Image: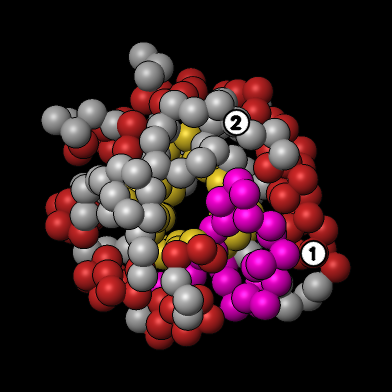
Amino acid sequence: MKIAPSMLSADFNRLAEDIRIVEEGGADYLHLDLMDGQFVPNISYGPMIYAGLRSQSQLVFDCHMMVTEPERYFEMVVKAGADIITIHVESTLHIHSAIQKIKELGCKAGLAVNPGTSVDTMIPLLDMIDLALVMSVNPGFGGQKFIHSSLDKIKQLADWRQTNSSYHYEIEVDGGVNEETGQLCLEAGADVLVAGSYIFKQADRKAAIASLRGK
């Protein structure tokens, strides 16, 4: 199980310190959200912040683009240090070419679905992607409750991967993840847990990360 602290829940006045703490605490990825106020009803930091954080960490930069027409920002995000770029099925009319573009730029490609979208929409692209992200809350804001129907999506993605040798994606879950829901996700077949509030609201972030792994 890999843990990806969501920097959206970190203290923006001390991002470098928070990154150091979760890195020393055993995090595997840093989950970085890009939001435009259109695809989701919120905005966040952009590629300039990514670039500043890149020198602070050796962790995988897991960049989640919750924006309309994400293709417009790919080159900026890559230059800022992204390792994985994840886009939403719902975010562009040209999802196949967008995934191709991410790969051409040298990044791993992820594909996300919102709670109201079936994972069946991902099927035409599953052999192209490196990460399948199940949103277990409606995207845009942290601190929401886990939507339990997301577990069925995780199980479906895990079953498809097990029965198709051309699929190599990791299954990531984002939203409402804590010690209890994280264990449910693990049992359903998840590989990566994104957690923001659960980690950054704890005095002992290392213990919070360990608890997500069931330790």
Numbered badge on residue 160? 1
- Whether residue 190 appears in magenta in the rendering, the answer is no
Name the residue beneath numbered marker 2.
146
Of the two numbered discs 1 and 2 in the rendering, the one whose residue sits closer to the viewer:
2
Q: How is the image coloured?
A: secondary structure
Numbered disc 1: secondary structure? helix
Residue at 62% x, 49% y: name it: 116
Numbered disc 2: secondary structure? loop
Query: Could you say which quadrant of the image residue 202 lies in?
Result: top left
The answer to whether 149 is drawn above or below residue 199 in the figure is: below
Of residue 195 and residue 123, the one placed in the foreground of this image is: 123
Local crowd size for mark 2, using a 10 Å CA cut-off: few (<14), some (14–19), many (≥20): some
Instruction: Tell me: 13 left or right of 28.
Output: left
Numbered badge on residue 109? none
Q: Earlier in the sequence, mark 1 or mark 2?
A: 2
Of residue 76 and residue 19, the one placed in the foreground of this image is: 76
Residue at 37% x, 25% y: name it: 200
x and y percent of residue 14 in the render?
A: 17, 31
The amino acid on which the numbered mark 1 sits, given as a three-letter code, is Trp
Residue at 27% x, 70% y: name it: 73
Instruction: Tell me: 213 left or right of 160.
Output: left
- Whether residue 116 appears in magenta in the rendering, the answer is yes
Which residues are the magenta region? Answer: 107-130
The answer to whether 76 is drawn above or below residue 141 in the figure is: below
Residue at 71% x, 49% y: name it: 154
